[in-house]
Image (cartoon, rainbow, N blue to C red):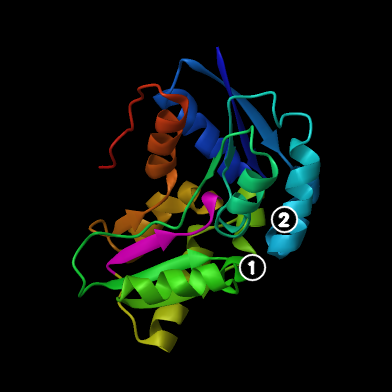
Amino acid sequence: MLKVVIYDSGYGGENFADALEQALPVVEVIRVIDWRNADKILLNSKSARRAAVEALRPYIGNVDLIIFANHLLTITSLNFFRKRYRNQKFIGLNLKEPTTFVDRDILILTTRAVARTLEYKLFVHNLKRHTSTLTVDSWPAKIDDGELSEDEIKATIVSHMVTKNIQPEEVILACAQFNDIEQELKNVLGKSLIIHDSFSDAIREACKALKVRGSVKKKK
């Protein structure tokens, strides 16, 4: 059986692993959730890379694919891992580029560590949309602990909308944990809200890397 490692620091990785298992029941999913180094992984790209190297050491070269369920590692370190460990396949959660109407306001939910990177700045520039970035570093840990309420989500987003004069019709999720609050986001911003996450694209890329067929569940 093909073996795939999912690496992350919180429930975002667990959620992605669940999605991958559903789409690809023919693979063995190994969850490497580095709870102990969660703060380091969310701090900056260098500390995230060091933590990943240490946690993945037993698996590199011994599994068919390693997936970073972490946007920071993907956009800053994926090429590093591919060059350093040429005999191991790696993919990750890339920033999702929408293909919808260009005149829609887009809110990007992410963390400061991601937003500070050159890769993120280039991503936003290349979107050529009216976008606004909301960094919420406290949310991943609260989601992991089940402590992020819809009231807090609403208060934070509404305050940002007023400050930035934006009426988002679409949201890009640039943190795997935020997939867990998609329903709350629709409750706050309306049921017609379009949510872009990276899970489906990563599952398709995994299928390609493993040379297998899978089923990606379409969003309603």
Residue at image mark 1? 113
Query: Which image quarter holds the C terminus?
Result: top left
Above or below 6: residue 35: below
Question: x, y percentage for residue 216?
Answer: 33, 32
As drawn, the label of residue 48 is 2
Res. 76 image quadrant? bottom right
Task: Kindly identify the residue that appears in the image at 57 percent across and 35 percent down.
Answer: 89
**Residue 168 visible, this orientation:** yes
**Residue 39 visible, this orientation:** no
Along the viewing direction, whichever of 74 and 108 lies nearer the viewer? 74
- The amino acid sitting under disc 2 is Ala
32 in the magenta segment: no
Task: Kindly identify the residue that appears in the image at 24 percent across and 59 percent down.
Answer: 99
- The amino acid sitting under disc 1 is Ala
Above or below 4: residue 146: below
Contact check, label 2 and label 1, Cβ < 8 Å: yes
Cα gap from disc 2 to disc 1, whole angstroms: 10 Å
SS state under label 1: helix
Above or below 209: residue 220: below
SS state under label 2: helix
In the displayed structure image, the side of residue 183 where residue 73 appears, left or right: right
Res. 193 image quadrant? bottom left
Task: Kindly identify the residue that appears in the image at 59 percent across and 71 percent down.
Answer: 117
Range of the magenta residues? Answer: 169-176
User: Badge 1 local density, few (<14 within 10 Å), some, or many (20+)?
Assistant: some
In the displayed structure image, the side of residue 185 where residue 138 appears, left or right: right
Along the viewing direction, whichever of 178 and 85 lies nearer the viewer? 85
Task: Kindly identify the residue that appears in the image at 35 percent across and 86 percent down.
Answer: 165
Question: x, y percentage for residue 204?
Answer: 38, 36
